[in-house]
Amino acid sequence: MHLAAHWSDWKPLTSLPALSERVLGELIDGGQAFRWNRQPDGSFLGVWSDCIAQLKHTSSGIMWRAPGELASRVARALPTYLGADSTFTPLIDTLPWRSDAHLANCLTAFPGLRILRQPFGETLLCFLCSATKQIVQIKQMTALLAQRHGAPIAQVHIGEGGPVVMHRLPTWRELADVPEKELRACLLGFRARFIHGAAKFLSDHPGWFDETEMLPYAAAKERLCSLPGVGEKVADCVLLFGAGRMEAFPVDVWILKTLATRYGLQGWKPAQVAHFGRAHFGPAAGLAQQFLFAYERAAKREAIKV
DNA sequence: TGACAGGGGGTGT
DNA sequence: ACACCCCCTGTC
C-alpha cells in the first residue's frame, strides 16, 4: 500500500468517441459492472482488477484521472476495459436495425453505448452475486467482498472526506480460503454456498478457468455452466461482459418482459426467447440486448419521475 | 421516525 | 413448481 493519496491530473479520454453523460452512466453504471459509483459532483469512481479510475463528462468530452501511482497502469488498462479495443460501429451495423424499428430507436437513444471488457474472474464473481438481486444490492455485496477479502490497491481522497483505502475484489484463489460463513457475512445469502463451491472447484483445477476464457463461445459456456450457481444467464453475462463474446445473449426477466411487450413474445420461455434473440439479432445479439436493456431502464426511470 | 410486508436481473432439485 | 437467503424499497 502507498501513502500517497493524490490524484493525477484530469486527462481527456481519447480512445473513445464522445459519449453523452447519460450514455457514459449507462455504460459503466448500468448493470454491466457493479463497482462504479456516482459521486456528488456527478463523476464516477470505479475499480476493476488493481485499477482505480474516476471519469467525468465535461463540455470537452470525457476526462479521466487515477491515483498518481496508478496513473500509467490505468492509462494502459482503461481503453481495453471500456471496450475501445473493439470497433463497435461495424458490429452495430450487423444488427437488424433496418427492419427492426424498436431496435433502431434504442440505438438512437444511446449513441456510442458498448460492451465493457472486464476481467473474466471478477465478472464471474459479480454475476454469481446477481441472482434475484438488483444493482444496488449487488454493489453492496461486491463492495463488502472487496473491502474484507480483497487486497488493498491505493489510498484515495474522495470528495470532502479523508483518505479511504480502496480494495480490489478477491481473486478466486483468495476466495478458496474464505469460509462460507464469512462470505455470508458479506450479505451474499444463499449465493455464498455457490461462490464457496466455485472457489473450491477452481482452486482444485488450476488452469481450468483461464482455458475456459479462450474456448469458443459454446464450449466456454458449457464449462461455466458446470460451476455451482452458474446457469445459462450468468454464463452469458460472464462471456459478454468479461470476455467480449458478443454472441452471448443473456435472458433475464427484463429481456423476457421487453421481448414480450415490444416483440409480441408473450408467454415465451427463456430458452425460446434466447433462440429468438440469436436468430433475430445475429452474431452481436449481446450488444443488441444491452441497447434494449438501456432503453427499458430509461423508460422505467422516466415513468417514476412523472 | 419506525416498523412491516412484498418482491428481487437465478439456479438447483 | 418451489426453496434458497435476506436486504432494499415503498408504504402505512
Image (spheres, coloured by chain):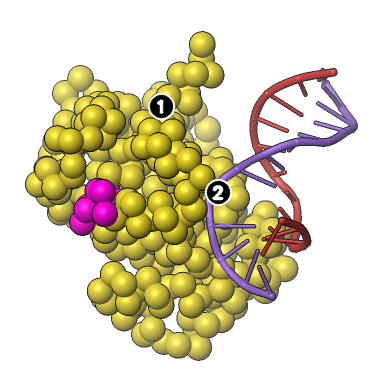
Chain colours: A yellow, B purple, C red
Query: Which residue is found at the position 37% from the left and 71% from the top?
Result: A221
Query: Which residue is found at the position 42% from the left and 55% from the top?
Result: A272
**Residue A266: where, in percent of width, then height?**
48, 40
Q: Residue A298 carries which label?
A: 1
Q: Do the residues labelled 2 and 1 touch (CB within 8 Å)?
A: no
Within 10 Å of disc 2 (Cα), the crowding (few <14, some 14-19, many 20+) is many
Prevalent SS, magenta region: helix
- How far is disc 2 from disc 1 in space, using C-alphas? 20 Å
**Residue A71: where, in percent of width, then height?**
25, 50
The range drawn in magenta is: A279-287
Q: What amino acid is labelled 2 in the image?
A: Ile
- Look at mark 2 in the image and give the residue it sits on: A138
Q: In which quarter of the image is the N terminus of chain A?
A: bottom left
- Residue A20 in sight from this viewpoint: yes
Closer to the N terminus: mark 2 or mark 1? 2
Does the stretch in magenta take in A201? no
Under circle 1, the secondary element is helix
**Is residue A83 found left or right of A35 in the rendered image?**
left
As drawn, A48 above or below A172: above
Query: Which residue is found at the position 49% from the left and 53% from the top?
Result: A269
Does the stretch in magenta take in A281? yes
Q: Residue A97 carries which label?
A: none
Under circle 2, the secondary element is helix
Q: What amino acid is labelled 1 in the image?
A: Ala
Within 10 Å of disc 1 (Cα), the crowding (few <14, some 14-19, many 20+) is few
**Residue A257: where, in percent of width, then height?**
48, 39
**Residue A271: where, in percent of width, then height?**
44, 59
Query: Which residue is found at the position 63% from the left and 62% from the top?
Result: A191
